């Protein structure tokens, strides 16, 4: 009994120590797992027509802690967008481009590794902020359907349509910026229609590829300011090449072999693809796209007469995400060539025909000269015979007169 009472007393002592520990354990654990979100989240517009600077500060609760690693998860997009970007960084700032026609939502949270030898990572709640660009002005006067084309990488024209209710006295103004400019620039070469601005012409030194090209168009009228319209382009996706030229065709009984020269200009030949458009007599136009770098192709077709072809070019998928097709080249045609002859070229046919005509003319000239020579010889021979006959008759007459005198 004494032993049992001692054992019971020891058990009660153990429980007295263990139970408070169980009670305190959740609070201790929860305190260790707490991570505060970043502080002082800001969205700053530098005035570059699209880029926004996002800044935040480390949570105050972490400034005195010696932790293995502190990082931040940042997610952002335009409001109503389903394509939000997400990055993880150790920096306290980030810059990216946005569509300033809409609001922007930004969220950031803290990521902490408590121990370097433990792969688990603690996350704070989100710190969230919404930014609304300044959109003062009359919305019905805002331009619409801006369309920019970079012609052969030599210059760019941007054209727009007036707002639905824009008055006649409206004066639109275009501004642009890219990363190589120190400040926002205004258009100095407006395209006008009946005295009204309908576009802007950009020279080559204003263009930049593989970087955001930001445009803002606003304006004024007697009724008030025009609501700005913002656009961001990648200019390599807006290129329209010139048309191919010097198209040569070689015809055979097996098909047509085509050769051409790539468009002259600043576009590298390996960045071009082509579309061949061809048609035979009384047939519709057919097309063949050549996505690889080439300046020739073979059309395995059978054509007996009146075959025509034309080409156009575009920037291929290896140099841009999109492009405009060039205008069609001038149409070249083959007419009435013999399909059974191999490697017959139009120019060669014309040359052969010229040789044949020259040979026929030469033969005719030789025959004519020969006939004339024969006629002259005959004429001379006839004249000589006639003279001899006259002399003979004269001699006989003299002899007869001499006989009578005797």
Image (tube, rainbow, N blue to C red):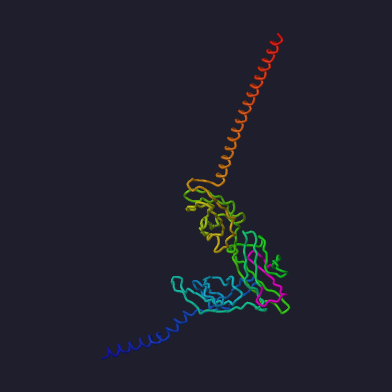
Q: Find out whether residue 180 is within the magenta segment.
A: yes
Q: Position of residue 164 (x, y in %)?
A: 65, 76
Q: In this view, does 32 lie above or below 211?
A: below
Q: Position of residue 321 (x, y in %)?
A: 54, 64
Q: Which residue lies furthest to the top in this view?
A: 406
Query: Which residue is at 51% across, 52% downward?
Result: 297
- To which quarter of the image does residue 179 belong? bottom right
Query: Which residue is at 59% across, 53% downward?
Result: 245
Quadrant placement of the N terminus:
bottom left
Q: Is residue 2 above or below residue 29?
A: below
Residues shaded magenta: 162-185
2, 345: nearer the viewer: 345
Q: Position of residue 381 (x, y in %)?
A: 63, 23
324, 72: nearer the viewer: 324
User: How many numbered marks have been drawn onto this rendered protein structure?
Assistant: 0
Q: Find out whether residue 58 is within the magenta segment.
A: no
Q: Position of residue 104 (x, y in %)?
A: 58, 76
Q: Left or right: where does residue 350 sit relative to residue 5?
A: right
- To which quarter of the image does residue 160 belong? bottom right
Quadrant placement of the C terminus:
top right
78, 173: nearer the viewer: 173
Q: In this view, does 209 lie above or below 253?
A: below
Query: Which residue is at 56% across, 50% downward?
Result: 248
């Amino acid at each position: 009994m004494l032993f049992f009472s001692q054992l019971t007393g020891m058990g009660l002592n153990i429980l007295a120590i263990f139970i408070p520990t169980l009670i305190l354990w959740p609070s201790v654990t929860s305190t260790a797992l707490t991570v505060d979100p970043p502080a002082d989240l800001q969205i700053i517009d530098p005035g570059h027509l699209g880029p926004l600077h996002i800044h935040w500060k480390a949570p105050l609760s972490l400034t005195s802690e010696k932790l293995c690693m502190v990082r931040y998860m940042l997610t952002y997009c335009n409001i109503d967008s389903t394509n939000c970007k997400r990055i993880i960084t150790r920096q306290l700032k980030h810059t990216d481009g946005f569509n300033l026609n809409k609001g922007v939502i930004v969220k950031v949270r803290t990521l902490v590794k408590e121990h370097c030898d433990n792969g688990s990572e603690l996350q704070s709640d989100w710190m969230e902020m919404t930014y609304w660009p300044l959109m003062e002005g009359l919305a019905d006067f805002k331009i619409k359907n801006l369309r920019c084309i970079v012609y052969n990488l030599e210059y760019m024209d941007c054209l727009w349509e007036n707002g639905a209710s824009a008055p006649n006295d409206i004066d639109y103004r275009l501004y642009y910026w890219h990363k190589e400019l120190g400040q926002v620039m205004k258009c100095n070469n407006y395209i006008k229609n009946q005295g009204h601005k309908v576009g802007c012409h950009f020279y080559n030194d204003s263009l930049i590829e593989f970087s955001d090209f930001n445009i803002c168009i606003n304006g004024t009228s007697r009724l008030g300011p025009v609501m700005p319209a913002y656009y961001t382009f990648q200019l390599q996706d807006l290129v329209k090449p010139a048309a191919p030229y010097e198209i040569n065709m070689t015809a055979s009984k097996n098909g047509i072999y085509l050769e051409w020269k790539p468009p002259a200009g600043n576009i590298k030949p390996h960045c071009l693809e082509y579309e061949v458009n061809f048609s035979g007599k009384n047939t519709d136009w057919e097309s063949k796209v050549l996505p690889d770098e080439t300046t020739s192709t073979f059309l395995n077709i059978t054509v007996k007469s009146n075959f025509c072809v034309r080409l156009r070019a575009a920037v291929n998928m290896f140099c841009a995400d999109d492009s405009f097709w060039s205008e069609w080249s001038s149409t070249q045609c083959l007419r009435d060539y013999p399909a059974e002859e191999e490697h017959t070229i139009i120019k060669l046919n014309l040359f052969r025909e010229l040789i044949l005509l020259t040979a026929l003319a030469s033969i005719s000239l030789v025959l004519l000269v020969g006939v004339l020579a024969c006629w002259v010889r005959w004429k001379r021979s006839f004249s000589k015979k006639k003279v001899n006959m006259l002399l003979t008759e004269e001699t006989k007459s003299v002899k007869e007169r001499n006989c009578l005198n005797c």
